[in-house]
């Protein structure tokens, strides 16, 4: 049992947050308005978002009025419980369809294609038969990158020529998946076209093709977000969610961010669950999101 919890906590050990120590230092001299103003700034700089930062500080201010001798450890404990409440319970996909179709979306540079490959490796390690659809036909070398990953993790791939129709790749992949008895289909998509409208229209077209082939697919639409870009990640999530309903988020590059609080901002504002976290370049550097371990790392 200890080994299980250690495995969950390991990805978050790479986070560079020092928020907990800063809070302890701040309130070591007592709770006053100067401290509360500084605390709100700390929360904001950790990318919890302006609304979440203000809400948390207001609750702590009210707590300090009720308990005059409030300690920094008590404040940290209160912050932890509030953040856990905002993140909510872990989400698990309930679909038992075969093939289970997962659409991967995100902007270029977010770690989308790498995250897809890591998911392929994860599902293969569970004994599932996995097929990758190289649908990002617009980005130079994207297909080659995914083909390299497919060979590395030992899964099949459906691809087409550069600049070809991504929805046609998705169609071929779903046909192949049904014929081969595949368990999981992972469909990569373009991260950038000429305009945002072009990109969203292309994603909508891929979804329509999936639904024609397998009526209730895609069963999951996962958005890859780079944790190091902070509030810009929240803007990306809003845009994608507006045009193609997102069922879950993969938070990437969490090991390189001192602003890991963006996970709280996304969950509290958009109610989209964080399902996975990426903390490195290896196929094994992907782990299920665990709220308790994440908050503990954020406040370490």
Image: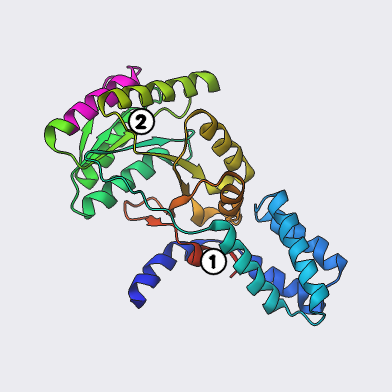
Structure colour scheme: rainbow
Disc sitting over residue 195 in the figure: none
Please name which of the two marks, 1 or 2, marks the residue nearer to the observer. Answer: 1
Direction bottom: furthest residue: 69
Corner quadrant of residue 62: bottom right
| Residue at image mark 1 | 297
Residue at screen point 46% across, 38% down: 246
Circles 1 and 2: CB atoms closer than 8 Å: no
Whether residue 18 can be seen here: no
Part of the protein shown in magenta: 160-177
Residue 207, image x and y in percent?
A: 37, 26
Q: Nearer the viewer, residue 23 or 285?
A: 23
Classify 10 Å Cα crowding around label 2: few (below 14), some (14-19), many (20 and above). some
Q: Label 1's element?
A: helix
Corner quadrant of residue 285: bottom left
Q: Earlier in the sequence, mark 1 or mark 2?
A: 2
Residue at screen point 76% across, 72% down: 63
Residue 111, image x and y in percent?
A: 44, 42
Q: Label 2's element?
A: helix
Q: Nearer the viewer, residue 277 or 215?
A: 215
Rendered view: 5 above or below 203: below
Disc sitting over residue 142 in the figure: 2
Is 232 on the left-hand or right-hand side of 272? right
Locate the N terminus and report the quarter of the image it occupies: bottom left
Q: Nearer the viewer, residue 111 or 291?
A: 291
Residue 25, image x and y in percent?
A: 73, 74
Rendered view: 236 above or below 118: above
Rendered view: 67 above or below 113: below
Residue at screen point 86% across, 71% down: 32
Residue 173 within the magenta-colored segment of the rendering: yes
Residue at screen point 36% across, 30% down: 142
């Amino acid at each position: 049992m200890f080994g299980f919890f250690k495995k969950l906590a390991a990805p978050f050990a790479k986070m560079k947050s020092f928020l907990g120590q800063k809070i302890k230092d701040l309130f070591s001299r007592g709770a006053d308005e100067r401290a509360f103003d500084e605390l709100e700034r700390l929360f904001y700089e950790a990318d919890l978002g302006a609304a979440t930062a203000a809400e948390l500080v207001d609750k702590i201010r009210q707590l300090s009025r009720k308990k005059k001798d409030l300690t920094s450890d008590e404040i940290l404990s209160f912050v932890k419980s509030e953040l856990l409440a905002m993140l909510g319970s872990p989400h698990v996909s309930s679909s038992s369809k075969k093939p289970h179709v997962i659409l991967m979306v995100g902007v270029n540079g977010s770690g989308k294609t790498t995250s897809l490959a890591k998911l392929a490796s994860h599902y293969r390690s569970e004994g599932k038969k996995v097929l990758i659809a190289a649908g990002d036909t617009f980005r130079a070398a994207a297909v080659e990158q995914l083909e390299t990953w497919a060979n590395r993790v030992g899964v099949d791939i459906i691809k087409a020529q550069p600049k070809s129709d991504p929805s046609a790749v998705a169609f071929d992949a779903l046909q192949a998946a049904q014929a081969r008895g595949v368990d999981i289909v992972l469909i990569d998509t373009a991260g950038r076209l000429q305009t945002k409208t072009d990109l969203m229209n292309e994603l909508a077209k891929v979804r329509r093709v999936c639904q024609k082939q397998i009526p209730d697919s895609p069963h999951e639409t996962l958005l890859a977000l780079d944790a190091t870009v902070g509030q810009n990640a929240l803007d990306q999530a809003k845009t994608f969610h507006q045009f193609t309903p997102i069922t879950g988020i993969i938070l990437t590059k969490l090991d390189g961010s001192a602003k890991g609080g963006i996970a709280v901002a996304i969950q509290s504002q958009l109610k989209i669950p964080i399902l996975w976290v990426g903390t490195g370049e290896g196929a094994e550097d992907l782990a299920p999101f665990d709220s308790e371990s994440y908050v503990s790392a954020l406040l370490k």
